Image (cartoon, rainbow, N blue to C red):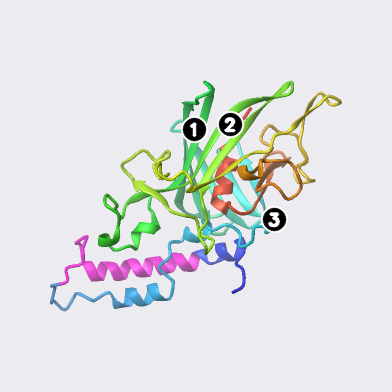
């Protein structure tokens, strides 16, 4: 099967939205106003959900967000995108290198969260969603330093939505919160300077390339709610690639391989912790760098998906 790129995934979204509407209409005809299907109904207005089963068999029942959760098909395949930031509206727009809009984020600083919408074309682009939410909070680490934390998730977990209730784990439900990434920021001194270090935990990848599912009841705190405390091996960790102090320029330096052309505190890279986050071309999994006023490049590869990479970039908005 041919690999599906970011543009292919986004181009398919309008069709998937149409199928979701079709499924919703069929569901309403099947179950009426009751939340559960009344299998004993005999009136002529009830229709068995065989049509829904056919749609699902064809793979059309997948949520429109599912395609945004899979990382690139190869560990060497780097996606190169562009982020535009409008300070007046506190909006970030994620685009392909050709200028095709992909995702839009709106930040609510007073409430401490950002909502991520799916762009569906147009000028200005129209939106579907919000599909994802990035929630901010602050804690104090074991080292006594302030840590700023962010949780990326969806208000509805498709891992549970299509699972029969009898097969759900005890306490499971069909309206749970799915966590997609857990991000921490903290200050670190490097040489005579200081940087904001980033640590990111994301679910490990399954054999088919999709991420493991972290989910919990939406009534619980979303921050770290989905992470299994009983299994420390259910996450992949990415950490900042640290710059080096350069005495000649009296400042910190880090090679961005020609991708970032402007100095900015928001320029940073991440690498898998197991690789010890050493600098080097091709060793990073994430690169975010400034190229102009309100314009940045965003490069990412496995184990990150497009929405995880975008959220990590969004978390640096208030760095100064």
Of 192 and 58, nearer the camera is 192
Distance CA(mark 3)–CA(mark 2)? 25 Å
Crowd rating for badge 2 (residues with CA inside 10 Å; few <14, some 14–19, many 20+): few
Residue 164 is covered by the magenta coloring: no
| Label disc, if present, on residue 318 of the rendered structure | 2
First in sequence: mark 1 or mark 3?
3
| Label disc, if present, on residue 99 of the rendered structure | none
SS at circle 1:
loop
Of 67 and 294, nearer the camera is 67
User: Residue at position x 24%, y 71% from top?
Assistant: 30
Distance CA(mark 2)–CA(mark 1)? 10 Å
User: Residue at position x 49%, y 37% from top?
Assistant: 150
| Count of numbered tags | 3
SS at circle 3:
loop
In the rendered image, which residue does mark 3 sit on? 97
Q: Do callouts 3 and 2 mark residues in contact (Cβ within 8 Å)?
A: no
In the rendered image, which residue does mark 1 sit on? 109
Image coords of residue 71 (percent x, y): 57, 57
Image coords of residue 120 (percent x, y): 53, 59
- In the rendered structure, the answer to whether residue 47 lies left or right of residue 127 reads left
Q: Do callouts 2 and 1 mark residues in contact (Cβ within 8 Å)?
A: yes
Image coords of residue 142 (percent x, y): 50, 25
Range covered by the magenta-colored residues: 14-39
First in sequence: mark 3 or mark 2?
3
- In the rendered structure, the answer to whether residue 43 lies left or right of residue 246 reads left
Crowd rating for badge 1 (residues with CA inside 10 Å; few <14, some 14–19, many 20+): few
User: Residue at position x 42%, y 40% from top?
Assistant: 224
């Amino acid at each position: 099967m041919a690999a599906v790129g970011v543009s292919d995934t986004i181009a398919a979204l309008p069709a998937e939205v149409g199928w979701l509407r079709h499924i919703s209409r069929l569901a309403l005809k099947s179950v009426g106003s009751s939340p559960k299907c009344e299998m004993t109904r005999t009136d002529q207005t009830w229709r068995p959900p065989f049509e829904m089963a056919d749609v699902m068999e064809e793979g059309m029942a997948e949520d429109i967000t599912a395609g945004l959760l899979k990382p690139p098909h190869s560990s060497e395949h780097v996606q190169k995108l562009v982020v535009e930031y409008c300070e007046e509206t506190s909006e970030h727009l994620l685009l392909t290198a050709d200028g095709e809009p992909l995702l839009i984020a709106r930040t609510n600083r007073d409430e401490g969260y950002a909502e991520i919408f799916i762009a569906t074309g147009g000028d200005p682009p129209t939106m579907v969603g919000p599909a994802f939410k990035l929630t901010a909070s602050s804690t104090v680490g074991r080292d006594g330093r302030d840590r700023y934390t962010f949780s990326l998730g969806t208000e509805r977990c498709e891992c549970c939505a299509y699972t029969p209730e009898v097969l759900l784990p005890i306490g499971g439900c069909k309206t749970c919160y799915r966590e997609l990434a857990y991000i921490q920021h903290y200050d670190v001194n490097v040489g005579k300077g200081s940087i904001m270090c980033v640590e990111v935990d994301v679910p490990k990848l399954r054999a088919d390339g999709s991420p493991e599912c972290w989910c919990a009841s939406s009534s619980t705190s979303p921050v770290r709610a989905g992470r299994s405390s009983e299994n420390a091996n259910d996450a992949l960790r990415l950490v900042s690639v640290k710059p080096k102090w350069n005495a000649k320029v009296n400042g910190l330096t880090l090679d961005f391989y020609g991708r970032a052309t402007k100095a900015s505190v928001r320029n940073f890279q991440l690498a898998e912790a197991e690789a010890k986050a050493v600098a080097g071309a091709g060793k990073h999994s994430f690169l975010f760098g400034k190229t102009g006023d309100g314009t940045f490049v965003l490069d990412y590869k496995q184990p990150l998906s497009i929405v995880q990479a975008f959220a990590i970039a969004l978390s640096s908005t208030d760095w100064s």
